[in-house]
Image (cartoon, rainbow, N blue to C red):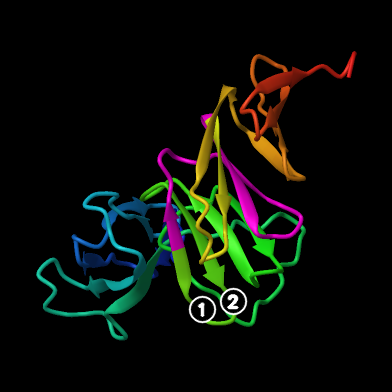
Amino acid sequence: ATESSLPSKVALSLRNTGGSYWYKYSYDKAFADVSHSHRTADEGLDFSVGFPLFPARAVGSYSDTLSVLLCYDANCNREVPGGPFNLPMRLDVGYFAVAEADVEPLQPAQTTVLTHDVLGAAYSAALDAVVTVSARPTATLRLHDLRSGQVRTVPLAVPPTSLSLSADGLRAAVGHDAAVTLLDLQADSPEPARRFDVPLAVGSLVLAGDRVVAMGSVSNNSNPIYWLDTKTGLASRFDAAFG
């Protein structure tokens, strides 16, 4: 995801009674794509700014300046006083939360730009850590330690779709397309990750108790729920009419 401090269009109004202006502009073509149009109604200029998707940029902030020079003649021997007119451009590359309409966002004391997407997140009070799962750039579970600031990573065999923590905050269930992975989040735990096949793409899940994970996924206008017995590995569909 990308965010820019510059709108997709910017305008420059011109006034030269009894005459016209000549103009030229410059910018770093590797940074942005800029096009312009002339408004005859009010002698203005419209600039449209876009940012190339390729080559891909690393996470970070990028800036440049669109410099517009106005002249009284075609060769710019006489420049309009006050020029050039500089329009700052900035591009922030990373993953950003989109604010909801009519909801005033809280101002956090500290923010961190992540280098990965987030498909599920939960807080573990026992570990004082935020647990996230991501599919890009790699399928990974991460534990963000809030006290030390360190991040511990656990590779996942396939991309995740959802995440749930146990009530004690020490275990995680990760949903996948047709699978569920159970992990012990304690750093010194000898227990390996366990993966179970399930007959649906897991859209959401809840790790409940020691044995059962409930899963739901929207498919064909229905929302089936399956119960997974983590001891036997058997998954069975829950029927609300008879359950």
Residue at the image position 65 percent from the left and 34 percent from the top: 231
Callout 1–callout 2 Cβ contact below 8 Å: yes
Q: Residue furthest bottom?
A: 82
Instruction: Looking at the picture, tell me which residue is in the foreground, 19 or 68.
Output: 68
Residue identifier under label 1: 149
Local crowd at mark 1 within 10 Å, few (<14), some, or many (≥20)? few
Mark 2 residue type: Leu
Q: Can you say whether 126 is above or below 34 in the image?
A: below
Mark 1 residue type: Gly
Residue identifier under label 2: 146
Give the secondary structure at mark 2: loop
Instruction: Looking at the picture, tell me which residue is in the foreground, 170 or 26.
Output: 170
| Quadrant location of the C terminus in the rendered image | top right
Measuring from the top left, give residue 3's x and y in whole percent.
Answer: 46, 60
Tell whether 89 sits left or right of 165.
left
Q: Quadrant of residue 121?
A: bottom right
Measuring from the top left, give residue 51's x and y in whole percent.
Answer: 32, 55
Q: What's the distance in space between the residues labelled 1 and 2, CA to CA?
A: 5 Å
Q: Which mark is residue 139?
A: none
